[in-house]
Image (cartoon, rainbow, N blue to C red):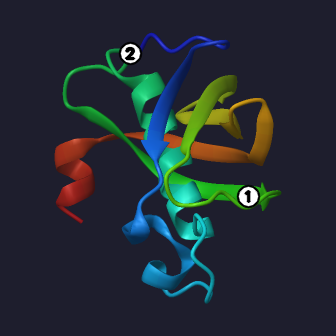
Amino acid sequence: MQIEVGTSATVHLVVTDVDTAIALGSGDVPVLGTPRIVALMEQAAVAALAGTLDDGATSVGTRISIDHLAASLVGVTVTATAEVVGLEARAVFFRLTVHEGDRQVATGDHVRFVVDRERFLGR
């Protein structure tokens, strides 16, 4: 495992109708839904770990805490960034942000554990 503090990745999403609170069942307004923000943040964390894990290893999310600060309308592009801020045994700690241009949409913290893929799936 060659994960380092400071490693980061960014992913982008153009918000569509399927990403809205209405479509996800998390509200009744046509704006980017919180569950989709969570998924986007996890996608950024997984991307940050790409190429750093040993053969046969993967990571699984175990905790996420976010603040959804602003609404994003259908058609806008949001950008999620995950940065490794700590390591402890098999745990990888991330700081997460989502922006729509210069405006912060969400922020949070996330923990992923590095596991042996086959052993994990064998449970």
* Residue 56 vertical position relative to residue 105 in the rendered view, above or below: above
- Indicate the amino acid at tag 2: Thr
In what element is the residue under mark 1? Answer: strand
Residue 81: x %, y % from top left: 61, 30
> Given contact means CB atoms under 8 Å apart, are the residues at marks 2 and 1 in contact?
no
Residue 70: x %, y % from top left: 79, 57
Give the camera-side residue of 75 and 117: 75
User: Which of the two marks, 2 or 1, is nearer to us in this view?
Assistant: 1
Give the camera-side residue of 73 and 112: 73
Residue 19: x %, y % from top left: 45, 65
Q: In which quadrant is the N terminus drawn? A: top left
Q: Which mark is residue 52?
A: 2
Residue that carries the numbered disc 1 in the rendered image: 65
Point 61% across, 60% down: residue: 73
Crowd class of label 2 (few under 14; some 14 to 19; many from 20; radius 10 Å): some
Point 43% across, 81% down: residue: 23
Crowd class of label 1 (few under 14; some 14 to 19; many from 20; radius 10 Å): few
Q: CA distance from mark 2 to mark 1?
A: 24 Å
Point 17% across, 60% down: residue: 122
Residue 72 in view in this figure: yes
Point 58% across, 11% down: residue: 4
In what element is the residue under mark 2? Answer: loop
- Indicate the amino acid at tag 1: Ser
Q: In which quadrant is the C terminus drawn? A: bottom left
* Residue with the most extreme front position: 75
Give the camera-side residue of 25 and 117: 25
Q: Quadrant of residue 98?
A: top right
Residue 88 in view in this figure: no
**Mark 2 / mark 1, whichever is N-terminal:** 2
Q: Which mark is residue 38?
A: none
